[in-house]
Amino acid sequence: MTEPPERRNFYGRVHGKTLRASQKDYLARDLESLRLRGVAAWENPRRTPLDPAVLFATPRPVWVEVGFGGGEHLVHMAALYPGVGIIGCEPFVNGVAMLLGRIRQAKVRNLWIHPGDARDLFDVLPSASVDKVFLNYPDPWPKARHHRRRFVTPGYLALLARVMKPGAEFRVATDIPDYVRQTLEEVPKAGFVLTHQGGQGEAWQDWLSTRYEQKALREGRSPHYLTFVRAG
């Protein structure tokens, strides 16, 4: 059983360093036209489902990136796969501002932004409506007492499993060995099958190394790439 939105705790950062003038401009001018409405509980208290077919101009596969950071991977995927509709979730305002700048530069038009908790999005997506989900370098919450805050825990994963189609792909990239351990333990319990586990040099063919990965490599940590498929 998952918590209703009004009772959930959210522990991640929402604000960081002072935004540059250009980033404030992106937020003021661009966010409203790209923000997915009807996701936040205050906008949709009845949790009426969204229709993915209405979000995009034509019927297409729907992908979701959970915690898109600075948005480089999200924009890369949107540009590489223009026939796919992508939704990015990120509560960190600075990351949203960086993504908006990248969208302006790349001029991609096949994505939406939910600047908030991914669980709110999963609440309102129909069952079996998502074809692929990315979880790239999530917050590691390294202290043992904080492991329950990680995305790869039952509350998050139950919502994720509900919205993913049978056979849909769930990709996880992390540089934290204990996050790999917990992912391998918890994700299969939620109804997923591990299909690939690789290390450095074994990323997906369409992978774009993010700034978080580059930081990990500079600091001597090795990436891990895990692929799961939603069981049918």
Image (cartoon, helix red, strand yellow):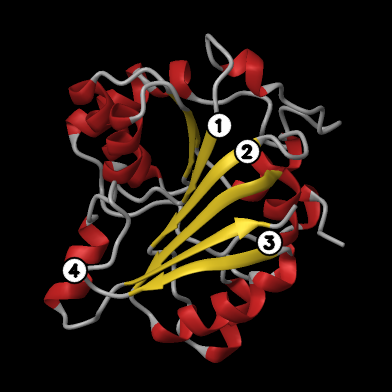
Task: Please determine whether, in this image, residue 161 is positioned above or below residue 163.
Answer: below
Q: Secondary structure at mark 4?
A: helix
Q: Which badge, 1 or 2, is on the more N-terminal residue?
A: 1
| Distance CA(mark 4)–CA(mark 1) | 30 Å
Q: Is residue 94 left or right of residue 56?
A: left
**Dot 1: few (<14), some (14–19), or many (≥20) neighbours within 10 Å?**
many
Q: CA distance from mark 3 to mark 2?
A: 14 Å
Above/below status of 107 relative to 135: above
Q: Earlier in the sequence, mark 3 or mark 2?
A: 2
Disc 3 residue type (three-letter): Leu
Residue 10: % across, % down: 61, 60
Of the residues shown, which amino acid type is indicated by label 1? Val
Confirm or deny contact between disc 2 and disc 4 (CB under 8 A): no
Front in this rendered view, residue 192 or 31: 192
Occupied quadrant, residue 225: bottom left
Which residue bears the numbered disc 1?
A: 62
The amino acid type of the residue labelled 4 equals Lys
Disc with the residue nearer the chain's start (2 vs 4): 2
Q: Which residue is mark 3?
A: 157
Q: Which mark is residue 130?
A: 2
Question: Of marks 3 and 4, which one's residue comes earlier in the chain?
Answer: 3
Please tell me whether mark 3 sits on a helix, a strand or a loop: helix
Q: Secondary structure at mark 2?
A: strand
Residue 185 picture location, percent across and down: 62, 81
- Quickly name the residue at label 4: 215
Examine the image and state in which quarter residue 190 appears.
bottom right
Is there a contact, CB below 8 Å, between mark 3 and mark 2?
Answer: no
Q: Nearer the viewer, mark 3 or mark 2?
A: 2
| Number of the front mark, 2 or 4 | 2
Instruction: Decide which of tag 4 and tag 1 comes sooner along the chain.
Output: 1
